[in-house]
Image: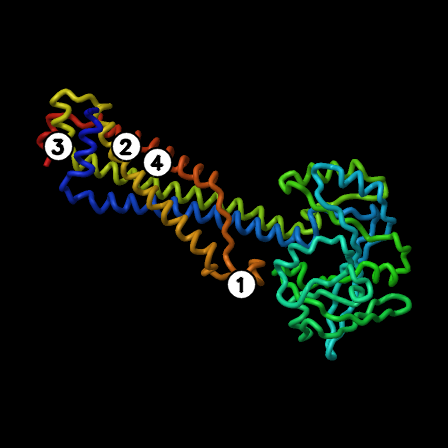
């Protein structure tokens, strides 16, 4: 049996000394809390970014194609739908879906109250999957039934609360143009994305209504909404689509359309880096303190081992093996702590949030095995490597003085 491992095993599991017991426990707890908080931090940040990004993507798509002009209003400049262009863009492996849409601002009136809105018009090819996940009540407009669908309107929970509306209620929308146009609608459903930029602004209806209001040709639209196959390749998809477009059209990503939201999400990465660094530093300081105290507590044993011919590196390995045990125990408890809270939160949503500030009403969690493996490997290597420096205190201890040390 390896001598250093044998001695380390004896002082780790069979020692009756109590002087360093409290410090050792604090070191283990430090590693446990440090690793647990790092696991939680990454899981929460990934959850936030994924949940908010999916909500924005669900409403606005990953990219839009609009007319390349100086129009900065909430009402699109029209252009003719181009089936050949749709085939070319849809044929790209980076694009999974392409849907026409148009927008038009208006004023919704119900029960004597009014609210400014933007009507987003879509057709029966629209992807309602994310809307269905965020539907509070009612149902999605049936745009396949042209007679009924043209009169159906999907509104946000914010607008519904402001105007005291519910599915089945009738409303009027005034479109400010020359001449003034008024159109009746029936509320089909209420959605809530938890994002002010969406909930306070948009209602959703049939695109053909916007065509008629604006006196557009039947084949004119306000733009195309695109879904990409891989969001991480969004910029590449934007470049590929722009290469296919004529000069009069241009593609913009949701990062261009919602810069404030994505800038906030980028800040979360910086906050996470700070948290990870602080937790590693706390764990390292605790381990260094524990190792130094263990070495000082066993000065007498070190002197005896040196007097018997043990080399400095052999004695260093005794304490490194001892530290290795503490690190592994702390990491085991840290994984149980971090993953346990993540599992509880993922299944129960026990930790709630204010939707007005955080775009959602609970703390989201997204777990990735690669994050867990990298965190464990990084924590283990950093803690073990920094132990080499304090263990060199062994080389400064002389046998004669150490044996007389009490």
Pick out the residue farthest to the front.
145
Q: Are marks 4 and 1 in contact (CB under 8 Å)?
A: no
Density class for disc 4 (Cα within 10 Å; few <14, some 14-19, many ≥20) is many
Marks 2 and 3 sit apart, C-alpha to C-alpha, by 17 Å
The colour style of the image is rainbow
Density class for disc 2 (Cα within 10 Å; few <14, some 14-19, many ≥20) is some
- Residue 91 image position (x, y, % from top left): 76, 38
In the rendered image of this protein, does residue 273 appear above or below residue 157? above
Density class for disc 1 (Cα within 10 Å; few <14, some 14-19, many ≥20) is few
| Residue annotated with mark 1 | 354
Q: Quadrant of residue 124?
A: bottom right
In the rendered image of this protein, does residue 287 appear above or below residue 198? above
- Choose between 387 and 191: the one closer to the eye: 191
Q: Earlier in the sequence, mark 2 or mark 3?
A: 3
Asked which secondary structure carries label 4, the reply is helix
Marks 2 and 1 sit apart, C-alpha to C-alpha, by 47 Å
User: What residue is rendered at 80% in x and 72% in y?
Assistant: 184
* Front: mark 3 or 4: 4
- Choose between 68 and 134: the one closer to the eye: 134
Marks 3 and 4 sit apart, C-alpha to C-alpha, by 26 Å
* Front: mark 2 or 1: 1
Q: Quadrant of residue 355?
A: bottom right
| Residue annotated with mark 4 | 383
Marks 1 and 3 sit apart, C-alpha to C-alpha, by 59 Å
- Residue 236 image position (x, y, % from top left): 69, 36
Total of numbered circles in the picture? 4
- Residue 263 image position (x, y, % from top left): 61, 48
| Residue annotated with mark 3 | 300
| Residue annotated with mark 2 | 390
- Choose between 357 and 119: the one closer to the eye: 119
């Amino acid at each position: 049996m390896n001598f250093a491992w044998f001695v380390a095993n004896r002082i780790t599991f069979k020692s009756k000394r109590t002087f360093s017991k409290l410090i050792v426990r604090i070191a283990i707890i430090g590693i446990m809390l440090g690793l647990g908080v790092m696991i939680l931090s990454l899981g929460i940040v990934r959850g936030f970014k994924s949940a908010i990004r999916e909500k924005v993507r669900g409403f606005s798509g990953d990219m839009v194609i609009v007319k390349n002009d100086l129009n900065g209003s909430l009402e699109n400049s029209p252009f003719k739908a181009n089936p050949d262009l749709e085939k070319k863009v849809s044929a790209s492996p980076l694009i999974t879906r392409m849907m026409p849409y148009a927008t038009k601002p208006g004023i919704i009136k119900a029960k004597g109250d009014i609210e400014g809105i933007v009507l987003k018009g879509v057709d029966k090819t629209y992807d309602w999957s994310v809307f269905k996940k965020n539907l509070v009540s009612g149902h999605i407009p049936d745009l396949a039934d042209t007679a009924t669908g043209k009169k159906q309107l999907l509104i946000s929970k914010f607008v519904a609360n402001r105007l005291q509306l519910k599915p089945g209620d009738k409303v009027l929308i005034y479109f400010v143009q020359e001449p003034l146009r008024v159109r009746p609608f029936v509320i089909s459903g209420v959605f809530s994305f938890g994002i002010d930029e969406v909930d306070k602004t948009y209602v959703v209806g049939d695109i053909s209504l916007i065509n008629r209001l604006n006196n557009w040709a039947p084949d004119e639209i306000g733009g195309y909404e695109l879904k990409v196959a891989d969001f991480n390749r969004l910029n590449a998809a934007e470049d590929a689509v722009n290469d296919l477009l004529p000069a009069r059209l241009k593609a913009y990503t949701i990062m261009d359309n919602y810069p404030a939201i994505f800038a906030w999400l980028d800040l979360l990465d910086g906050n996470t880096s700070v948290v990870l660094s602080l937790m590693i530093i706390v764990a390292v300081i605790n381990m260094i303190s524990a190792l130094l105290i263990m070495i000082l507590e066993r000065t007498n044993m070190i002197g005896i081992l040196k007097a018997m011919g043990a080399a400095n590196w052999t004695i260093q390995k005794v304490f490194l093996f001892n530290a290795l045990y503490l690190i592994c125990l702390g990491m085991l408890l840290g994984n149980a702590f971090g993953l346990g809270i993540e599992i509880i939160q993922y299944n129960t949503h026990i930790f709630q949030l204010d939707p007005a500030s955080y775009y959602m009403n609970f703390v989201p969690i997204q777990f990735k095995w690669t994050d867990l493996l990298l965190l464990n490997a990084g924590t283990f290597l950093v803690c073990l490597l920094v132990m080499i420096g304090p263990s060199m205190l062994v080389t400064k201890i002389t046998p004669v003085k150490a044996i007389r040390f009490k």
